[in-house]
Image (cartoon, helix red, strand yellow):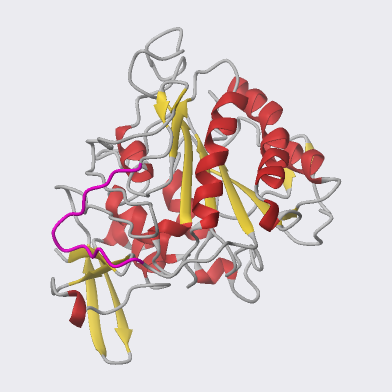
Amino acid sequence: MPHRWVADGRVFAGVDSRPEIALRRTATYVPCFLLMVASACEQDAADGDFGFDTPTGGTMVSMTATTAGSVGSSEAGSGSEDSGTTAQGGSTGSTGTGADEGSTTEVLPTEPCTTLDILFVVDNSDTMADEQVRLGAAIGPFIELVNQQLPGVAGSIQVAVITTDASEFVTTTPTAVCTPYASAATWMAYGPTIATELQCAAAVGTMGDPDERPMQWAADALSPAMQGPGGFNGGFLREQGPLVVVVVTDEEDDLEAITQWGSPGDPADWVLAIAASQGGFVQNVIPLLLVGVEAPNACPNPWNGIDGAEVAPRLAAFAESFPRNAVGDLCASEYTTFFNAAVPEIAAACAAWVPE
């Protein structure tokens, strides 16, 4: 099993535990992640070959951010000891202050961001009708509030939507054709039509595959193959600001032994895959999750596969591995409160953005 660490604020992986001889993992994380179901990923590097063995359990690597005034760490399944605002039963903005062995305390150069990319991952399985209605009501005001609160990126927000069963950006829903977007792309750009476009795209319906894989498809949607020239999602990711990943699902993302449903890998692998889209900098990713949380929560009934939401500690562990994050209660009667509370986390990450 490879060692993983954070050095100079980046996520590293390799067979040697010494950062000074580490092989940088950037865009290679995503294809490796997508091959985890085969248990290994090999890729040639200019200075030699390196392999990535799939972990099958154990503790997630501590992710320690070292940007100015923002240091956070978490262990898989344990959450963050130091958390900020509580939003509807979840935690918003983990900001721990400890540094684990193998991490650096060097302060990275930062600068205010000038762009913001937001990816929504919306569960389109047959139990998500009510949640999509609540999301649709909150999503437009959320984008508008972000635009107001981040003057440095005003007018430079790009938004995309995927489902939990595909990595292509949504352009057509079961009830409407949402394109052409004003951006003339498969993603949406901030402007007069953004609220209408986003509400259409987020209404992904409930006829999707019951094999929900939010983290696998999020990583694939952000991969070089999908983002590069000719890729279906091309032109979405930019290099002048951070990435917000919003996941809305009523089930845990857990690879099931019998059916093989769920995303392969563990939370640490998902961190590697998503951080790769930002040059490996965990500081430049802000996960916002509306998922099942431990009681007390707003679910009227315990999860039975239909009602409420399955508690999702693995998804929460993924989110809390990033220094800025928010985890909220999917069963909440409205989502505006959650999104409003998350905006300061986005603003803080944008102010301390680390250039790639």
Asked if 242 appears above or below 25 in the picture, the reply is above
The magenta stretch spans residue 48: no
Residue 145, position as x, y percentages in the image: 69, 38
Looking at the rendering, which quadrant does residue 153 occupy? bottom right
Residue 91, position as x, y percentages in the image: 39, 30
Q: Nearer the viewer, residue 132 or 25?
A: 25
The magenta stretch spans residue 98: yes
Note whether residue 172 is visible. yes
Residue 137, position as x, y percentages in the image: 70, 26
Count all numbered tags in the image, as a single digit. Answer: 0
Residue extent of the magenta highlight = 95-107
Residue for point 47% across, 36% down: 289
Residue for point 41% across, 60% down: 275
Residue for point 78% across, 39% down: 195
Q: Which residue extends farthest front? A: 69
Asked if 269 appears above or below 46 in the picture, the reply is above
Magenta region, main secondary structure: loop
Q: Which residue extends farthest top? A: 300
